[in-house]
Amino acid sequence: MDQAKRLLCTRDLWNPFNTTFVQTCGMLLVSQIFHVILKPLGQPGPVAQILAGLVLGPSLLCKIERVRQIFIQPAFEAYSFLLLFVFRILFMFSIGLEADLPYMSRNMKRIGVVAAWNLGVCGAFGAAASFFVIYLLKVASHRFAFAIIIMIIVASTASPVVVRLVAELKFDTADTGRLAISAALFIEIFCIAWYSTYLAFSAGNMFGFALVCIVGTGIVAYANRYSFGDL
């Protein structure tokens, strides 16, 4: 109760819900402006959304005090991370709905090769970049964990963009589009499993919880396959 009171009853004029609504409207407005400008030039929708994020980020418009008070509020940082995590789960759930399971089962080798090369290149780039980031930010502790997080971010960031580009360019039913969506789904699953495994082995009190989650997931998958497979 006290935590909820501190979160909602702050001195700021905005509560998390109003802030989220205003931020969403601002991002949609700027994104639509860029989309109208870039669409005649042949640029897909994700490019406009990325540019909107850059414009509304700390590098440009958020340097203005009024804009920064709306889009960057330290009091709601934890809430923003939670909301981001929830929406990312929903987005990846939509990717799972678009996945073609028969195609994935027939082309498992090709999908695995594409995903493995992508993970290898992104992992190597993330490992190299982590040295510079650690040096610039002067990270003194948990450097290995920080490097792993950088590698996972680099490997998983492009997957939602790939899915949006495939849908925007209208070749999600083509062989190349289905291959890209399937590889993106594999990469996301691997990144989640990689980070979860690291947390389970680095924190001793989470290892038992990880085993319970694995067993529970296996039971649910087994029940879903053999109990509802014929429906």
Image (cartoon, rainbow, N blue to C red):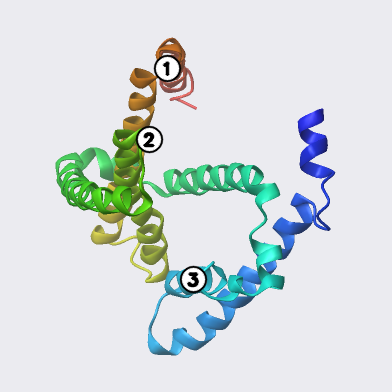
* Residue 41 position within the rendered picture, expressed as x and y whole percent measured from the top left: 39, 89
Q: Amino acid at mark 1?
A: Ala
Residue drawn at the location 33% of the way across and 66% of the way down = 171
Q: Earlier in the sequence, mark 1 or mark 2?
A: 2
- Amino acid type shown at disc 2: Ile
Which of the pair 2/183 is nearer the observer? 2
Q: Which residue is mark 3?
A: 54
- Residue 131: which disc? none
Quick one: quadrant of the N terminus? Answer: top right
Label total for image: 3
Where in the figure is residue 37, as x and y percent of width and height? 50, 88
Mark 2, Cα crowd under 10 Å, few <14 / some 14-19 / many 20+, is: few
For the point 34% across and 30% down, the residue is: 193
Q: Is disc 1 in contact with disc 3, using a CB cutoff of under 8 Å?
A: no
Q: Residues within 10 Å of mark 3 (few under 14, many from 20)?
A: some
Coordinates of residue 67 in the picture (x, y in percent): 68, 71
x and y percent of residue 168 in the render? 42, 69
Horizontal placement of 47 versus 108: left or right?
Answer: right
Q: CA distance from mark 2 to mark 3?
A: 26 Å
Mark 1 and mark 3 lie on one chain; the one further toward the N terminus is 3
- At 76% from the left and 32% from the top, the residue drawn is 3
Q: Nearer the viewer, residue 194 or 110?
A: 194
- Image: 13 above or below 147: below
Q: CA distance from mark 1 to mark 3?
A: 37 Å
Residue 210's disc number: 1
Residue under label 2: 192
Do residues under tags 1 and 2 come within 8 Å of each other at their CB atoms? no
Q: Work out how far the residue at label 1 is from the one at label 2, CA to CA, in angstroms.
A: 13 Å
